[in-house]
Amino acid sequence: MSDLFTKVFTAWDRGEHLREWAVLQHIHAHDPDLAPRPISADLDAHPPVVRMTLVPGSPLPARPTPAQAEALVAAITRLWSIPFDGPWRDDLAFARRLTDSPRPHGLAGKAYDAALFWWDGPDPLLLRQKPAVTVLGHRDPYLENYLWDGSRVRIVDFEDACVSDPATEVAILLEHLSARESGLHAGLFDVDPVRLLAARRLWAMFWLWRLLPGGPSAHRNPPGTADLQAQRLVQLLGEPAP
């Protein structure tokens, strides 16, 4: 059995292949046991290809054990400790995908109305400001991208990696559909609670947009998922600031 993995990109219009290759090299230079070791790449091929070592372990389950959750936090914290420079930009465009779309019906319409009101509050101004601390952000916290070998977690899939901040990274993790029933919670991380809540609201808006009829994730999830997401968004928007 080969100890190498070849990633063939199905989409690369946003430079996904370039990011994957560059970030894998950067991580390997600073923390070589945290992620796959980059081997080679055909970045000008169609489709592009990146070759890397296989990482030991299995994807985290939908409900990680306490030991697995602790190892996940440790791996993410290690990633944040890697020095990483580059341009920072806010994520407000992800929230606009919902509120720039036509108003949906039913429960999603109620969430949509609350999201429109959100733009007049303090969260957008806060999230537009560059955070005091920036980190290398994974940006793809699908639980299957975290591999557990029985004692520790390693991270794979860096095609969306960029300069981010800890609160936003935790928000993306907690609001990802794969973590919805995981038991993971904000108390596992030491991040700014005000920025965290603001970012969770933003990413909950993004997920509702994805789950609406015709959205990119609508066909991948069981019926009723959009309504559940609408309820979640309304709840988050109604939570008082920490």
Image (cartoon, rainbow, N blue to C red):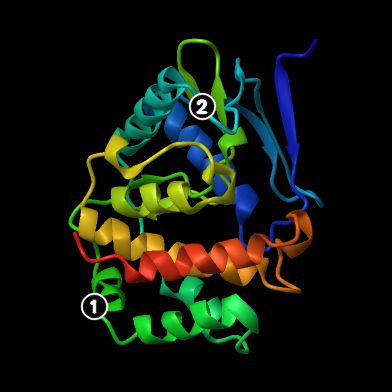
Image x and y of residue 212, in percent:
67, 72
Point 46% across, 27% down: residue: 28
Point 60% across, 88% down: residue: 103
**Residue 180 appears in the rendering:** yes
Image x and y of residue 173, in percent:
46, 46
Foreground of the two, 168 or 130: 168
Foreground of the two, 142 or 39: 142
Image x and y of residue 182, in percent:
51, 37
- Tag 1 residue: 122
What is the three-letter code of the residue carrying label 2? Pro
Other-residue count near label 2 (Cα within 10 Å), few / some / many at <14 / 14–19 / ≥20 = many
- Tag 2 residue: 64
Find the distance from the CA under tag 2 to the CA under tag 1: 34 Å
Point 60% across, 72% down: residue: 209
Q: Quadrant of the C terminus?
A: bottom left
Left or right placement of residue 139 versus residue 121 in this view: right
Q: Secondary structure at mark 2?
A: loop
Q: Earlier in the sequence, mark 2 or mark 1?
A: 2
Image x and y of residue 90, in percent:
37, 69
Other-residue count near label 1 (Cα within 10 Å), few / some / many at <14 / 14–19 / ≥20 = few
Q: Are marks 2 and 1 in contact (CB under 8 Å)?
A: no
In the displayed structure, 44 sits above or below 216; it is above
In the displayed structure, 174 sits above or below 3; it is below
Mark 2 or mark 1, which is nearer to you?
A: 2
What is the three-letter code of the residue carrying label 1? Pro
In the displayed structure, 197 sits above or below 72; it is below
